[in-house]
Image (cartoon, helix red, strand yellow):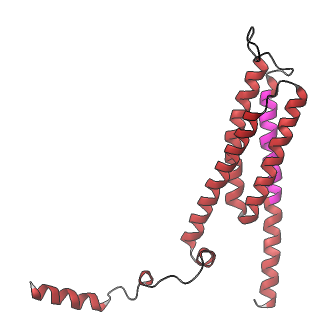
Amino acid sequence: MQPLFAILQVVSELEPFGRLDTDEPRTESAFERIKRDSDARFAAGCALFSIAAVLHGVGSIAIVSIADPKTNSALVDLIVKLGVFGLIAGAILIAIEPVSAYFGSLGGQLCGGVYLFFRLRESALGYEGIEGLEQAEYGVEMSYLVTIALWVGLAILLAAIAAIRSMVSRRLQLGRDRKGL
């Protein structure tokens, strides 16, 4: 048994794969690691996509759940609240990383849009004879129009914000390269 341990000890000291970075404690911050390591960048992008999708989905569903869109003024108020929420949350997330946050925001808003569609359609159809579930002032076609217009409008505005953020980031990088930083 001892010759086997002697062989294993000799083999382990040879380091056949060279020095592994896993043996050293990490002294750099997570942001430095993300900038340097492509796998860490991919993981951070996936995490940001997921966070954006959940934030937008839960936020827009909460806004629609609280509202009671029976009148046209209540519908306009709901549209404004959803639009402002989507733009503010999307702009904050896009400032971190534009592509992942943009598509995550649109995915979350799509989930919220489906809920909005069903809520508006239910309000537009109404139920006869049940108090509190009367038919809304607008027609069923508004459920389609509002949902699609809100999602497409948000997609266009967030794309513009992402493009502006990318241009600013590119110019800042060019300025750093010229100064030799």
Query: In the displayed structure, would residue 45 be above or below residue 76?
Result: below
| Residue at point 58%, 77% (across, down) | 33
Residue 83, quarter of picture? top right
Near-viewer residue (78 or 37):
78
Quadrant in which the N terminus appears:
bottom left
Residue 79 x %, y %: 84, 38
The prevailing secondary structure element of the residues shown in magenta is helix
Is residue 159 highlighted in magenta? yes
Single out the residue that lies furthest toward the left.
1
Q: Is residue 8 magenta?
A: no
- Image-based side of 17 in relation to 120, left or right: left
Q: Quadrant of the C terminus?
A: bottom right
Query: Viewed as shown, does residue 30 lie left or right of 98?
Result: left
User: Total marks drawn?
Assistant: 0
174 vs 115, left or right, is: right
> Which corner quadrant of the image does residue 173 belong to?
bottom right
Residue 130's spot in the image, x, y percent? 73, 11
Q: Which residues are magenta?
A: 143-161
Q: Residue 42 at what x, y percent from top left?
A: 58, 65
Above or below — where is 35 with respect to 142? below
Q: Residue at x 69, y 53 (%)?
A: 103
- From the top left corner, tell me how far across and down residue 55 is, in percent: 68, 50
Q: Quadrant of residue 123?
A: top right
Left or right: residue 42 compared with residue 1: right
Which residue lies at the image location 83% right of the left edge and 51% below the top edge? Answer: 157
Q: Is residue 13 above or below residue 172?
A: below
Q: Residue furthest top?
A: 129
Residue at image position (64%, 49%) is 54
